[in-house]
Image: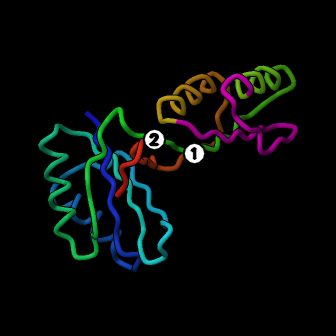
Amino acid sequence: MKHTISALVANRAGVLYRISGLFARRGYNIDSLAVGPTDDTKVSRVTIIVDGDDYIAEQVTKQLGKLIDVKKVRILPEGDITVRELVLIKVRVDEKKRSEIIDIAKIMQCEIVDISHTTLMIEFDANPEKVDLLIDLLSKYKILEIARTGSIALQKGHQSM
């Protein structure tokens, strides 16, 4: 089972190193890791997707909470969060397949951000399952490159960190 963990951390050098070191020492695997600024320039939000049972998620949360630069950490409740990823996909195209790929992009509500005689670059932001679906739909064509961010998430409603 995948768990989404959100942490507010001090925005300074070495914090991400200590967080990733904690995962390495404990033998936990990170499925996704995204870090970005918040409205406070001194604080960053770290979103971590970890695969494991509830015990592993609780242990990760407790261990993260012990790190000096971690201000707040919690497991976001599944089903009560909005999760998004961004992906850029460069696909090789020819005259015959170009319209098919453009149709897929339109149906999936993607944006075409670059086009040439031989390639098409698609930008898409959605939940990870829809990103996986787009990649699967385009896999029958020649995907040249994929750049995919880690997941970011916020809890729905009035609750916040």
Residue that sits furthest to the front in the current view: 158
> For the magenta stretch, what is the residue range?
106-126
Residue 94: x and y in percent read: 82, 27
Q: Main secondary structure of the magenta part?
A: strand
Q: Return the residue nearer the eye: 8 or 141.
A: 8
Q: Label 2 amino acid? A: Val
Would you name the residue on which mark 2 appears? 83
Say which residue appears at 54% left-offset and 25% top-offset.
133
Residue 97: x and y in percent read: 79, 22
Task: Let me know if residue 82 is in the magenta part.
Answer: no
Q: Is residue 119 above or below residue 133?
A: below
Say which residue appears at 29% left-offset and 40% top-offset.
77
Say which residue appears at 77% left-offset and 20% top-offset.
100
The quarter of the image holding the C terminus is bottom left
The quarter of the image holding the N terminus is top left
Locate residue 99 relative to residue 126 in the image: left or right.
right
Q: Return the residue nearer the eye: 42 or 123.
A: 42
Task: Let me know if residue 117 is in the magenta part.
Answer: yes
Q: Is residue 159 above or below residue 39?
A: above
Asked where in the image residue 146 lies, by quadrant, the reply is: top right
> What secondary structure is found at the residue carrying circle 1?
strand
Q: Label 1 amino acid? A: Leu
Would you name the residue on which mark 1 appears? 86
Residue 115: x and y in percent read: 83, 41
Locate residue 12 relative to residue 21 in the image: left or right.
right
Residue 50: x and y in percent read: 28, 45
Asked where in the image residue 67 lies, by quadrant, the reply is: bottom left
Mark in the foreground, 2 or 1? 2
